[in-house]
Amino acid sequence: MLRIAEGTRVRDLSEELKELTGEDVSKCIQCGKCSAGCALSPFMDLLPHQVMKLVQLGHQQRLFTSSTPWLCVSCEACTSRCPESIDIAKVMDSLRKLCLEKGYPPKEKDLYAFNTTFLDSVRKHGRVYELGFTMQFNLATGKALRHLGETLSLALSLWRRGRIGLVPHEVYDKGTVQKAFETAERFVK
Amino acid sequence: MTESSQEPNIELLTYSEVVEVRGFVGNFEVQIRKKPRYVDESKCTGCGTCIEKCPSKVPSEFELGLTVRRAIYVPFAQAVPNVPVIDPEHCRKLTQDKCGACAKVCPTGAIDYEQQEEIITRKVGAIVVATGYSLFDPVLYGEYGAGRFKNVITSLQLERMLESNGPTGGKVLRPSDGQEAKTIVFLQCVGSRDEQKGIPYCSKICCMYTAKHCILVKDHHPDAQCYVFYIDIRAGGKGYEEFVKKAQREAGAVYLRGRVSKLYQVGDKVIVEGVDTLSGEKVEIEADLVVLAVAMIPNPDAKELAKVLNIPFDDYGFYTEAHPKLQPVESATRGLYIAGCCQFPRDIPDSVASGSAAAAKVCNIFSRDELVVEPRISSIDPEECTGCLACLEVCPYGAIVTEEYQGRVIAKVIETLCQGCGNCAASCRTGACTIRGFTEEQILAQIEEVFERRAKVA
């Protein structure tokens, strides 16, 4: 239920997004082409066009408790097909950011843990340190304890084939990677 | 209007109605009832002193009750002619024989309380019917509270409010307390597209004027926020889609797809209970003002006038054109044309187009000395006709009249009106009535020929 009382500013969210991304969601005509072509939409609790509509209505509570922005893999099929040329993937990305900023817990916790652990690993080593990343991700999500035997045997067979190393292989020029992170962070404030 | 009132070839008969039409194309005789306006048009200078002095105040019809007018009044500022009329139901002189202020102050002595209704006759060659439309009464929707909630108004009332010389001077105010309206909710399709309580057709113009209202509201009150509940946005027309997008993007109107279920009052707000079916979310809005886009319907007396003019009309009371695609402004009766919303809901460009088309059709008739008629029309043999007049009853064009023939009354065809439909020929008991080129002998000969050929083939 969306309640619009006196003083409710419905357009705040779309204006905030516009400032953040340059994308005007009020342009959306609800044709549904984004939802029709989205590979992940069967797993989403809101279809991409519904997300656009809820942004127009400024329904933050519904948006920031939705799985959709987290499930979006930024394949940009929607973006390239949108008749109003809205960069929908970009909007989804910004919604993830706003969700965290506004203090809503991410709806897809595992995905969030994966993203953060992955980036942490890259930041530290300049590339992914597979073993460390896998262990950290499994610890963060509790998966390691639930499937301990399975995880260990997988790790062992991967190590035997030389797919993962025991120690991290760092890149030569970690400074450049650091710079990339810093630049990205400037955009995220 | 002013231009037409000054054109020497145009006689403008306002405050009058057609009571009878006789004759046919090129030869119509129209009887017109001129209602008494109690003001002598030839003496009145339009100074307006009488209006200022009149003590009776009644809700103004033109301003839809948003303000008052006097018992002697000019309906609206640009009315032609600029001559006031006395409303006999509210005038103290005419109802109680008191007051008489207007007659006292009139500098030219134009007020005439004794004026009587007058029936005048005019001969005309063609008739264009452009009697317009009426609006659906939203009181039928109890759930919307129209008539009960002061802050629930119709689009036409908002249209008057947005007018700079209107009752609120262009400001959008809550009728309940005169406060500026900040949150305005528009409800589309009130009465239209509703087979249960309203009418099944789409009223056609509401999507566009609501978009216009959103833009104007934003223009007059930049702080205001408009919401529009709609079923479909029907914006087919030159620049129409772009205009709706302008309302959404530039004026920031929020469109919600769904019909509102109910309105109710809490304090000085009207709560709108709706849904947005696109996101699947129920929506509740605290509104200052709710505007109902009520359906266009035929005038209440449209059917009555249709009988006077002999124009067919549909189930709703809209006048029927002779052919929906090829004769869109012609009626079934030759020389009688229909234009504008008496035919079906239309916006301004469409109404202007149909009016212009009807005028062009009239010019087409008037520019010739003789009218060309179809050769396959009815003819009645006066010797055979018994005068039963079965044909007269079935003729949809009013093309059959009676005449005296050798001391008997018989039927006669007006050839300019007959369209050759054949109803009369089929109904004729004696065979006096036939369609030229389709006599019984000719039809039977054709049938025989067909069967003979078939027999040969077999």
Image (cartoon, rainbow, N blue to C red):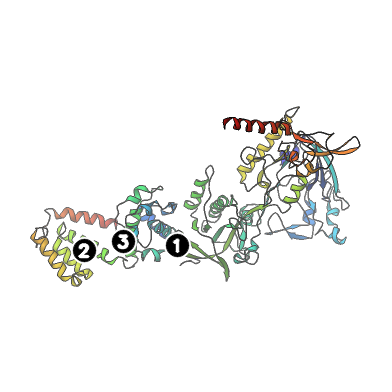
Residue A40, by quadrant, is bottom left
Category of crowding for the residue at label 1, using alpha-carbon neighbours closer than 10 angstroms: few (below 14), some (14–19), many (at least 20): some
Residue type for callout 1 = Gly
Quote the CA–CA distance across marks 3 and 2: 15 Å
Q: Chain of mark 2?
A: A
- Is disc 1 in the same subunit as disc 2? no
Looking at the image, the residue that sits furthest to the right is: B407
Q: Quadrant of the N terminus of chain B?
A: top right
Residue B37 rendering spot, x and y as whole percentages = 82, 50
Q: Residues within 10 Å of mark 2 (few under 14, many from 20)?
A: many
Numbered tag placed on residue A70 in the rendering: 3
Task: Please name the amino acid that badge 2 sits on.
Answer: Thr
Q: Are marks 1 and 3 on the same chain?
A: no
**Residue assigned mark 1:** B280
CA gap between label 1 and label 2 equals 35 Å
The subunit letter for the residue under badge 1 reads B
Say which of A20 and B406 sits in front. Answer: B406
Name the residue that disc number 2 marks: A117
Give the residue displayed 60% in from the left and 32% down from the top. B455
Residue B413: x and y in percent read 79, 36
Are both tags, 3 and 2, on one chain? yes
